[in-house]
Amino acid sequence: MALAVPAEKLAKLSEIARSVRQDVVRMVYEAGSGHPGGSLSVTDLLVALVFEELKLDPVQPNWPDRDRLVLSKGHAAPAYYSVMARRGFLDIEELHTLRQAGSRLQGHVDRNKLPGVEASTGCLGQGIGMAVGMALDQRLAHRSGRVYAILGDGECQAGPTWEALMAAGHYRLDNLVVLLDRNGYETDGATEAIMGIEPIADKFRAFRLETVEIDGHDFSQILDALAHARATRGQPTAIVARTVKGKGVSFMENQHAWHGKAPSRGEAEKALAELGGRL
Amino acid sequence: MAERRVESLRDAYGQALVELGERDANLVVLDADLSGSTRTALFGKRFPERFFNVGVMEPTMMTMAAGLALSGRTVFASTFAIFAAGQAYNMVRQSVCYNRANVKIVATHGGLLVGGDGGTHQMLEDIALMRGLPGMTVVVPADAPTTRSATFAVTDFDGPAYLRLTRENLPTVTDGRFVLGQAGELRAGSDLTLVAVGALVARALEVAEELHHVGVEARVLDFASVKPFDEKALLKAARETGAILTLEEHSVLTGLGALVASATGENYPVPVRRLGVPDLFGESGEPWGLLDRFGLSKARALEEAWELLRVRGKVH
């Protein structure tokens, strides 16, 4: 089913993702706290969605015909803010305000502070349910907007996540896509060591979601999966994106210690050098 | 005292929902497998395409409700109070209130009057939980007419609301006029004030009637609008009557009584006594018998009233 994605497009997306990863490191370093690991793992999914897949208008964030993106793993806020800034929803300069008093860039995304955020999230297990509500609304109103929700893998241990997936399958919401950022780690360690969620694709299928598994850092696979979701009728789609926690920064990769910790100045400089940037 | 009509608050809610559904095609209703009990089934029968019975998933009923509301809809979500405020608390907090979603939670089966189902299902902490949420409106109607008008009233603004309804049919004690943020004065008086919500409003009126027979005139205030709270009416009562007795079918630690005591304590201290459920879980029993068993009897309320009158030096 692979579609030919032009090489220039892939190169452009990769370049944006590299900038976003630099932003993430700078933002979390400057803020002195935050979640670099899961922000770096989800970056490519966010870039593909916001730059290629979603119908959005930065000039009219509430454009009625837009698609909706719900960041259920609200702690990936740094990557989200950077992607939205680079898509024109806010100034790049504002990224320096992350987690500061009075900033629109809260530690977890807040729709009442920052236009473009569809749903405030943070406490896990709530985003999929809100996305289900939004998808139901689109269908009831005979609108064609699509809803995309990004789920973390630790969040797959939360009961309400499965309630919401059960509802998505029951209502046959083919305008809903759930993307799982399967980086394998949560705060305290590997998901499979703490509370195993595998076989996760089988679980999604059992909950009546069309399910595909991809490399979540390969843009052509991501775009293919999104096209497949768009062509799927009668059921929602789950995209299990295998990713690397801390992707792009060698000493953060697959280290759960970097789930929710800010780098020191030296570490930030080293990380940025690997990403081709500077502090 | 003339016999009062006794009516179902839940029926009043269900009927009001149908009328709201007729006038607003944008309104949707969710329930969690209790639609017969909560009466949302009336709406579901009339507007099946706008009714979602999600089964036993109260947390996700609240997140779905928020998602529908953030898409521009007016959303009602109903289940028992223990599930709405208890099971789904953080969903109500984050998905509904933090998002400022236009979700009206109508929770039936609040308080001891649930009866036979016992302590697991008798929600005695919900007023505290819901009142503590920024942006949340909290209404505890005393009768069917207030339930009807409050159901309409909460659709007049864009934002979250929590209505707590009683399972038992209750005597009609108001004329149904309800304004958010305004206490209803159901009886005039200057010797002391009885402040009550929900099922205990009728009890407060019974107590006032008894006191009247011996020459004591008690003011009775119905605080159906718990939040926004009519502090003005409360402080006026404190100034003019000098003593306040609160009555509620809720934990005495954190409910209306605590609110009244803190509001008067800060602004116009007068003796306050609080009648509510002690720091205990409920238990099974005949509903009205449970009120007596947990210290909410008319006799107990009268004792408290006399004690206040003694403290104020109005009787010896």
Image (spheres, coloured by chain):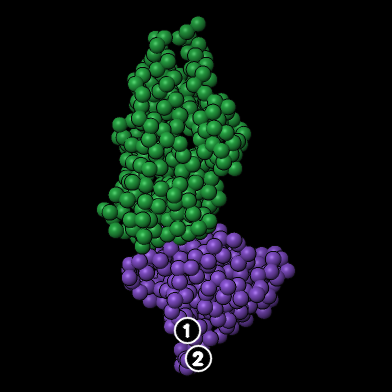
Q: Is residue A74 above or below residue B291?
A: below
Q: State if disc 2 and disc 1 touch (CB < 8 Å).
A: yes
Mark 1: secondary structure: helix
Q: State the residue in front, B241 or B65.
A: B65
- What residue do we see at 66% from left, 64% from top? A187
Secondary structure of the residue carrying tag 2 is: loop
Which residue is outermost to the top?
B316
Residue A228 badge: 1
**Residue B283 location, x and y as percent?**
60, 36
Colour applied to chain A: purple
Residue at the image position 65 percent from the left and 75 percent from the top: A199
Identity of the amino acid at label 1? His
> Which residue is more in the foreground, A57 or B20?
B20
Residue B1 visible here: yes
The structure residue drawn at horizontal position 53% and vertical position 86%, both measured from the top left corner, is A221
Q: Which chain is green?
A: B
Up the image or down, A271 lies above or below A163; here it is below
Give the percent coordinates (x, y) of residue A39. 57, 71
Residue under circle 2? A1
Characterize the local packing of mark 1: few (<14), some (14-19) or many (20 or more) Cα atoms within 10 angstroms: some
